[in-house]
Image (cartoon, helix red, strand yellow):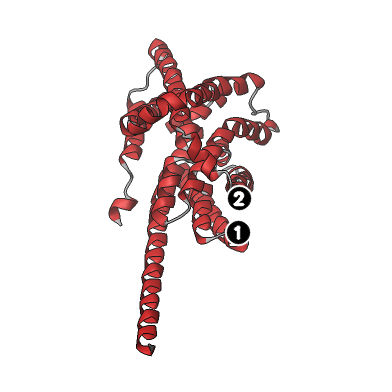
């Protein structure tokens, strides 16, 4: 239990990046050079995502369209509506505009891929459908997330411009499509070397987080953000996750999904991606307080990992108990039949 509740190594590295940016923020030409490097690294990440994604796996999961609609509706409709409601109810004295933007940005992001599939597998859910739903969420997110940001922030003059949408498509979608085109040739090799290539994913995120917080620190981030702000963000993230988990559990049961599909909807619908969220924020909010905007997402990332780890183990225990009970009942029935004979 303790190991599941403690931050994983990647979260500890994120914390280290924030601390390093707070103590030694990079500025000037060095910051520009690191920014260019981050742009190349992010493009490489999405190229690798496209190359690793097996088309046969995606096609295998496409038939369960009701499940995919449920997951996508939760990701891109339920989450934003909850985010709007929570931020509207919070007084301005409890949350700064940048943090408020961060919560809304978190709510319009796509689902995770790796952790959604992993938790679904642990809990005994529909893994092929989880692969398809999580992958579709990330692909659609390249279009839907900028559009939702434009809708949610447009009223306050903080939406994204056409140039920013084009930048997102060029930096994220074009490399992804290139990877998909080359998948028949490079896919098997990329999947065999997923673990070492994962260093590119995590390294790019760490670099962008460091740059975002370095810029925020230079502009006085820690003078504007205090312990109360962090406590409020933590409470908002916990409330948001609790509401989404409750909604996905209740609605998937009411709609008549099987147990395996309900598990998939819960774990794919409740996640938000840090891997895609960080580069998207870097493009969408260029020139703004990116460090503060990313803070709710970083906290939510760790909360979702801890809560879903415990929840997945609980589902697994229930599934094991039911299997044992069914096996025992089958054994009793066979014994009764034998005695009757």
Foreground residue among 15 and 204: 204
**How many numbered marks does the figure carry?**
2
Mark 1 highlights which residue?
Answer: 251
Which structural element holds mark 1? Answer: helix
Left or right relative to 294: residue 69: right
How crowded is the residue under tag 1: few (<14 C-alpha within 10 Å), some, or many (20+)? some
Cα separation, mark 2 vs mark 1, equals 9 Å
Residue at the spot 42% in from the left edge and 41% down from the top edge = 114
Where does residue 298 sit, x and y in percent of width and height? 44, 39
Where does residue 171 sit, x and y in percent of width and height? 52, 21
Where does residue 129 sit, x and y in percent of width and height? 51, 47
Q: Identify the disc placed on residue 324.
A: none
Residue at the spot 63% in from the left edge and 18% down from the top edge = 163
Q: Is residue 313 above or below residue 334?
A: above
What residue occupies the far front of the structure in this picture?
Answer: 341
Residue at the spot 54% in from the left edge and 40% down from the top edge = 59
Where does residue 31 sit, x and y in percent of width and height? 41, 16
Circles 2 and 1 in contact, beta carbons < 8 Å: yes
Q: Is residue 57 above or below residue 19?
A: below
Q: Identify the disc placed on residue 70.
A: 2
Q: Quadrant of residue 222?
A: top left
Residue at the spot 39% in from the left edge and 68% down from the top edge = 323
Left or right relative to 90: residue 186: left
Left or right relative to 66: residue 30: left
- Image quadrant holding the C terminus, namely bottom left
| Sequence-first tag of 2 and 1 | 2
What residue occupies the far left of the structure in this picture?
Answer: 3
Which structural element holds mark 2? Answer: helix
Answer whether residue 152 is visible to the viewer in this image. yes
Q: Quadrant of residue 328?
A: bottom left
């Amino acid at each position: 239990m303790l190991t599941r509740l403690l931050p994983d190594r990647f979260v500890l590295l994120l914390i280290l990046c924030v601390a390093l940016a707070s103590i030694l923020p990079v500025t000037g030409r060095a910051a520009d050079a690191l920014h260019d490097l981050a742009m190349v690294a992010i493009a490489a990440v999405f190229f690798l995502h496209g190359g690793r994604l097996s088309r046969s796996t995606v096609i295998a999961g496409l038939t369960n369209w009701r499940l995919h609609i449920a997951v996508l509706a939760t990701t891109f409709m339920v989450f934003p509506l909850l985010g709007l409601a929570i931020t509207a109810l919070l007084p301005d004295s409890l949350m700064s505009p940048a943090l408020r933007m961060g919560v809304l940005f978190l709510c319009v992001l796509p689902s995770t891929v790796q952790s959604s599939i992993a938790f679904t597998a642990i809990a005994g859910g529909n893994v092929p459908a989880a692969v398809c739903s999580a992958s579709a969420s990330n692909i659609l997110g390249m279009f839907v997330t900028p559009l939702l940001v434009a809708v949610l922030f447009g009223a306050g003059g903080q939406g994204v411009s056409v140039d920013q949408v084009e930048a997102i498509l060029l930096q994220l979608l074009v490399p992804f499509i290139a990877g998909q085109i080359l998948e028949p040739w490079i896919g098997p090799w990329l999947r065999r070397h997923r673990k070492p290539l994962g260093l590119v994913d995590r390294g790019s995120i760490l670099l962008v987080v460091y740059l975002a917080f370095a810029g925020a620190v230079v502009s006085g981030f820690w003078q504007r953000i205090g312990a109360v702000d962090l406590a409020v963000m933590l409470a908002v993230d916990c409330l948001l996750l609790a509401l989404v988990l409750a909604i996905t559990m209740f609605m998937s049961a009411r709609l008549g999904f099987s147990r395996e599909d309900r598990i998939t909807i819960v774990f794919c619908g409740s996640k938000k991606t840090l891997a895609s969220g960080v580069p998207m924020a870097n493009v969408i909010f260029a020139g703004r307080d990116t460090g503060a905007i990313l803070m709710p997402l970083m906290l939510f990332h760790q909360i979702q990992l801890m809560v879903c780890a415990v929840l997945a183990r609980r589902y697994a225990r229930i599934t094991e108990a039911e299997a044992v009970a069914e096996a025992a009942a089958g054994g009793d029935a066979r014994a009764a039949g034998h005695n009757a004979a």
